[in-house]
Image (tube, grey):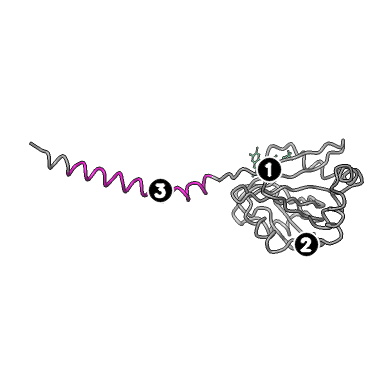
């Protein structure tokens, strides 16, 4: 837990609950001794680059939290520098809920999961949506040339804080691609054994022929 994250997440009511349940002193120490924790380091950058999805929480003008899944090629959430993230907004269902919410409140939370390694990263930040000409300099950096999908704009996030959580209670899950890779030697072995079995059967039939 970094100082920056604690400063944002540990509101007076949260602190009140920590006091009530006896954890306040422990977290007060963390707030005093931990690192600032708002600049993305090498580890965070590599972790973000490997993600093919994340969850994005925004806040509506009526005060409701709103969570949406974002997905793309691994690395579609780009680290532009140690305080800045960006991803392209592609034309989708045209509900524009997250996009509309950003016009009211720029504070967002991102939740990134790596199920195989049971690792999760939470990021808090301020998001700005750029469209048209304003989006171009960002899109040139982050959109792969020849991409068939139409980028309507870009969301740029100024990181305010991040925090890693423990792996407890995360069930490891694997993508189809990861499963295919792990199972490939087994499939090969199965195929070799089937071939061998066929050959031996044929030999056996030859031997016992009347
Ligand atoms: C044709 C189509 C393509 C989509 N492609 C993506 C995509 O590549 N990545 C993604 O996160 N969401 C994709 N979506 C989902 C939507 O774009 C969704 O509108 C977007 O996540 C914004 O959601 P919100 O209005 O709830 O904030 C797609 C939806 C449709 C209908």
Mark 1 beta carbon near ligand 1 (under 8 Å): yes
> Which numbered mark, 3 or 2, is in the foreground of this view?
3
Q: Check disc 3 and report the residue beneath it.
A: 186
Residue numbers of the magenta segment: 176-203
Q: Earlier in the sequence, mark 1 or mark 3?
A: 1
* Residue lying at the far front of the rendered structure: 22
Q: Is disc 2 surrounded by few (<14), some (14 to 19) or many (20+) residues within 10 Å?
A: some
Task: Residue 157 in the image: state x and y as whole percent.
Answer: 78, 54
Quadrant holding the N terminus? bottom right
Q: In the picture, residue 80 is in which quadrant?
A: bottom right
Q: Secondary structure at mark 3?
A: helix
Magenta-colored segment: predominant secondary structure: helix
* Residue 21, percent from left and from top: 85, 43
Residue 116 position within the rendered picture, expressed as x and y whole percent measured from the top left: 59, 49
Residue 39 numbered mark, or none: 2
Which residue is label 1 attached to?
91
Quadrant housing the C terminus: top left
Q: Marks 1 and 2, Cα distance to the nearest angstrom?
A: 31 Å
Q: Is 43 left, or right, of 133 in this rendering?
A: left
């Amino acid at each position: 837990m970094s100082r920056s994250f604690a400063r944002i997440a540990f509101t007076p009511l949260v602190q009140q609950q920590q006091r009530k349940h006896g954890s306040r002193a422990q977290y007060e120490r963390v707030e005093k001794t931990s690192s600032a924790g708002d600049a993305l380091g090498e580890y965070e950058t590599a972790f973000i680059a490997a993600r093919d999805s994340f969850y994005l929480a925004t806040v509506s003008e009526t005060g409701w939290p709103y969570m949406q899944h974002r997905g793309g090629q691994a690395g579609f959430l780009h680290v532009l520098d140690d305080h800045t993230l960006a991803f392209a907004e592609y034309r989708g269902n045209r509900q524009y809920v997250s996009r509309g919410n950003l016009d009211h409140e720029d504070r967002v939370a991102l939740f990134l999961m790596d199920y195989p390694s049971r690792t999760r990263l939470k990021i808090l930040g301020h998001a700005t949506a750029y469209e048209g000409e304003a989006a171009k300099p960002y899109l040139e950096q982050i959109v792969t040339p020849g991409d068939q999908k139409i980028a309507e704009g870009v969301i740029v996030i100024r990181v305010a804080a991040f925090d890693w959580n423990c792996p407890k209670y995360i069930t490891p899950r694997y993508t189809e691609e990861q499963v295919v890779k792990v199972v490939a030697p087994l499939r090969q072995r199965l195929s070799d054994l089937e071939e061998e079995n066929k050959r031996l059967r044929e030999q056996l039939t030859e031997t016992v022929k009347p």
